[in-house]
Amino acid sequence: MSRLFARVSLARRHQILTLLVAAAAIAFPLVHDNDADVDSAANAAAYATLALGLNIVVGFAGLLDLGYAAFFAIGAYAYGILTSFQVMPHWGPLWEPFAWLQLVQRVPQPGGDLVRFTVSFWIMLPVSALIAAGFGVLFGAPTLRLRGDYLAIVTLGFGEIVPIVVRNVDSVTNGAAGLNGIQAPRLFGHSFGVAAWPYYYVAIALVALLIFVSVRLRDSRIGRAWMAIREDETAAAAMGVDRTRTKLLAFAIGAAFAGATGTFYVAKLQTATPEMFGFPVSVMILVMVVLGGMGSVWGVVVGAVLLQLLQSWFLEDISGWIHDLGNAINQPWMQQVDLTQSIELIFGQILVFMMLFRRDGLIPATRKQSSLSVEQQHADVRRGGFVGLEGLGEFAHQGHSGLEVSGVTVRYGGLVALNAIDLSVPVGGVVAVIGPNGSGKSTLFNVITGLTPADGGAIRFDGDGLLGLPPHAILRRGVARTFQNIRLFTNLSVLDNVLIGQHARLKTGPIAAVFRPPSTRREEAAARVWASQILGLFGNRLLPRASQTVSHLSYANRRRVEIARALASRPKILLLDEPTAGMNPAETLELAEQIKSLHALGLTILLIEHKLDVVTRLADKVVVLDHGEKIAEGTPDEVRRNEAVLQAYLGRGTLAKGMVDA
Ligand code: ADP
Ligand code: MG
């Protein structure tokens, strides 16, 4: 039996499991004829949809949102207001078309007829999602520039503000008393009424839909961009991800899930009060996500269902058992125990336990991987080949007039990191920047790639001014880089890292990601082919490790992945910041050869390098920086003999032996 099981592929096992879960969910109300339990299960499903939405924001994009219940409230009140007797304007002919569309009813009144809103639940489900998404963008736009704790505090604020507003605009929301008389959904002329089962089926359909949407988004260009931002925002921007847009998209989609759930939730309760959407609710949803596993679609569903059922079924049962036990052993204080009252304490304990023992949640988003077998590791190292990579060269040449840096100055407070630097890299050239530590080399790269603003000067590439452009726009123009202190997306696979490198060259948006039309499938397939070709540049160093998480790789392989990621973006110019740092002589030589063949393909290269043999081997021109000043420029040989350079490296008066030997 177990052998049989092992022969079934992982994907097939997932399918079978999904089918079994779906069948069990569909059968539950049929086999378990208890209205209260079915109702609890419907609530659990509603919380699962909330957890799925928050998972997009917190789990995928890594944006800690402590006020998520605000969007739940917005969706709830949108439906509540448009289907209750709360807001009733005077009837006028303008309402006629709406009445015809059955969105409103005319209510005869002695003092003049009134309008009653009767918008259908089925219309409001998507509309509330859109309204909440709109608020997501509204709240997100000013705040998403903040990171980490600051974002958490601001979202906490929004989470508090929404219920306060609801409590205070009595005329629209009926204040603290809450909306009453909210319509139940109707289907084929029948109202859902108060039976639990129709709501249950709507809820599990919603969960199924949102699981589908979540998985499709996760496995797409959009999902990869979210995870890139979660892993390293700066690197994501440098690899072409538009930070603001991508984060807003996560916020808006997460909010949309909550908005639709809000509508469902109040339609089921037929009432809405501000208390239903306070801070404890946001925390509860967050605990569900953490318990299930941040970023894990099925995990957060399981987390939500477990916690919700814990609250509505088990805590009451357990409290009952404690009371019975108290009776039996004659301990009256045990009668007082009511675990449902200490739910927040229990959430806190769950969080602490998860942090201590299982940080990745019950169903972690990434699987533990076995490392490569000994044979795989020792398979002889094939030199990188460039078969099929002519595409890289073709792109490199297109309408390209080199990089021109003129008079660029960067100051950090009193420190002048770059002082009026001029530098030009001709098309197809290899220019090396050398200089002692702290001389401003990396700062030069940061200013070219838009990560550091300049205090003066100009940078032109291909005729366009680069200064003032955001990093992703600079990458789009064909300027890709690596970082001195490797900045990979550590918890993602090698392949995903390289796919993110292509972000700017792909088009798939959120809608195409969900529906996956043929054009999107083709684009994704081509992106994977391109990624494996790029990985093939490094012989079999990376290809066998394509599905491994970057955190499992050796240092040298991480450097290679970073170069591969930059190349994947089809750059015209490649900026390499100390690419051979930390590599042994053999690896250094191998990489130098590979960089040389990139050059042979027509790629323009700007290189920061300490190892002078590498510089001599590769560069046509060397620029020497010291204390933010350019002190020399010329061919490698000229620079080696330059007096100022020798002094900068070895100090005044010292014989420049090391330099000459190198
Ligand atoms: P290099 O790459 O040549 O070793 P850097 O460009 O990293 O040098 O740094 C140049 C100078 O600028 C150093 O003195 C460094 O301390 C300073 N510096 C770099 N980044 C920052 C920053 N973000 N804030 C303040 N000072 C910085
Ligand atoms: Mg540096």
Image (cartoon, rainbow, N blue to C red):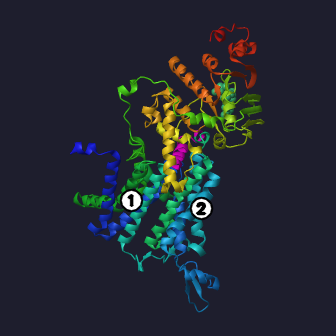
Asked whether mark 1 lies closer than 8 Å to ligand 1, one says no
Q: Is residue 47 visible?
A: no
- Which residue appears at 32% of the width and 66% of the height? 37
Residue 448 location in percent, x, y? 69, 35
Q: Confirm whether the magenta stretch covers residue 149.
A: no
Q: Check disc 1 and give the amino acid type.
A: Gln
Residue 140 location in percent, x, y? 61, 55
Disc sitting over residue 333 in the figure: none
Which residues fall within the magenta stretch? 221-235
Q: Quadrant of ligand 1?
A: top right
| Nearer mark to the viewer, of 2 and 1 | 2
**Quarter of the image containing the C terminus?**
top right
Between 294 and 468, the one nearer to me in the picture: 468
Residue 347 location in percent, x, y? 42, 53
Task: Please count the marks in the image.
Answer: 2
Q: Is residue 126 visible?
A: yes
Disc sitting over residue 308 in the figure: 1
Q: Check disc 2 and give the amino acid type.
A: Gly
Give residue 36's quadrant in the image.
bottom left
Residue 250 location in percent, x, y? 54, 53
Q: Secondary structure at mark 2?
A: helix
Disc sitting over residue 134 in the figure: 2
Task: Classify residue 302 as left or right of residue 536.
Answer: left
Above or below: residue 404 compared with residue 48: above
Q: Residues within 10 Å of mark 2 (few under 14, many from 20)?
A: some
